[in-house]
Amino acid sequence: MTATSELDLAVAAATAARIAAADREIRAFVTEPGRQRRLAADARQLSRTWPAAASQPALFGVPVGIKDVIHVDGLPTTAGSRLPPTELAGREAAVVARLRRAGALIAGKTVTAEFAVLAPGPTRNPRDLRRTPGGSSSGSAAAVAAGLVPLAIGTQTIASVIRPAAYCGVPGFRPTRGRVPADGVVPFAPSLDTVGWFAVDAAGLARAAAVLYEDWAPGAAEAAAHRPPVLGVPAGRYLDRATRPALAAFDAQTRLLSAAGYQVCRVPVLDDMDEIERQLFIITRYELAGVHGRWFSRYGAVYQPPTAAAIRAGQAIDRRRYAVALTARDNLAGRLAEVMAGSGVDIWITPAATGPAPIGLGSTGDPVMSIPWSLAGLPALTLPAGQVTRLPVGVQCVAAAGADERLVYWAAGLETVLARA
């Protein structure tokens, strides 16, 4: 046995041991009998495929958690539901195939809210076990925050990466909609669903991006290297949705960024939040009902009440209202692009959530701070930025559509400053 394969087996054994020990309380991972044996076999295969250290790919031996709405060959997909896994079975997701080609070690499936909608799974927040980790990518965020894995994949339709990242105190990233393939993912609302991920730092987000994008272009950020980004605060009714303690923390965070040399400007925008939320509701519920039409007619009795209510709400929406909502979505995206171009803003900065993680596991928290950006399909990431009442909070950073490389490049500098919060 080579030193490399010995190391791989040690990583596999340590990963399985961490999950077995910590997950009794946190419950970030879906239970998997024989996890240690599978990980050991996978580690041996990695060593056979890439025996020489010089040839090993970017994520060689890195344990990765995969949200349980994403298909992984050899592991059942339940989507946090009580439907038979055979009903949900499908081909391995493109993002998982890319992780494998990069040498990653698939640590297992992470817990999700049922069908990535509203009904929480059993995961607890590692920062305070009484509190929600956020959702729907609850298990993935908690797994990284608890140190079980350094990288975990989630999905975001509304706020399912950004919010749990903030609640759990880790970086999280949601690409421009469509730039990372979502095939092989059990959908929530297909026109909005986006694969995202969590890592221990901004550099980890960037390493994963280089693997998961088909068209990742590091050179696209070179033009941004000569100057810091202009940061825009979306002044108006949008910010009113955050709590007073969260806004006080955000004010301190913006002062830190200004003191570090960043230009921070307040730009009036998003005063029609009620209408934005209404259109998002129409799109998500209408598409959810379409996805679940066959399953819900057969297995409706085993759906959790919040999911069933969301599907029934979608069934009551007609095609005309849905078409109007899609037009409103496109108009919002165009309007935000115009405001960014006109004001010179490179990155919107906002509270990543309305406040720190609330007590209780019956809800995943309020998604509102992500709603306009997700509806517009813009790339967003959250960076840890201090605490409120001894619980982590984050700053959400949102760039223009397609500016993912610049956003990830700039994140490293922003992370350094916000670490002082």
Image (cartoon, rainbow, N blue to C red):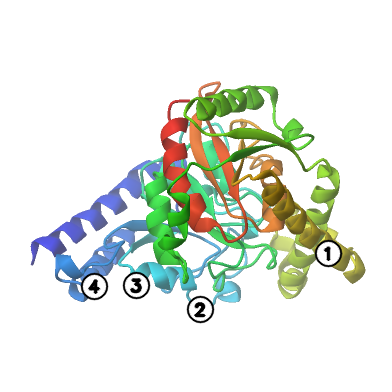
Tag 4, which secondary structure?
helix
Q: Residue at x 59, y 70 (%)?
A: 84
Q: Tag 2 or tag 1, which sits nearer the N-term? A: 2
Q: Tag 2 or tag 4, which sits nearer the N-term? A: 4
Residue that carries the numbered disc 2 in the rendered image: 91
Q: The residue under label 4 is which amino acid type?
A: Gln
| Whether residue 143 is situated above or below residue 109 in the rendered picture | above
Q: The residue under label 2 is which amino acid type?
A: Arg
Tag 3, which secondary structure?
helix
Residue that carries the numbered disc 1 in the rendered image: 327
The answer for how far apart the CA atoms under marks 3 and 4 are is 12 Å
The answer for how far apart the CA atoms under marks 4 and 2 are is 21 Å
- Residue 252 x %, y %: 57, 23
The answer for how far apart the CA atoms under marks 1 and 4 are is 49 Å
Label annotation for residue 101: 3
Q: The residue under label 3 is which amino acid type?
A: Arg
- Quick one: quadrant of the N terminus? bottom left
Q: Residue at x 37, y 57 (%)?
A: 207
Q: For this rendering, which residue is in front, 311 or 390?
A: 390
Tag 1, which secondary structure?
helix
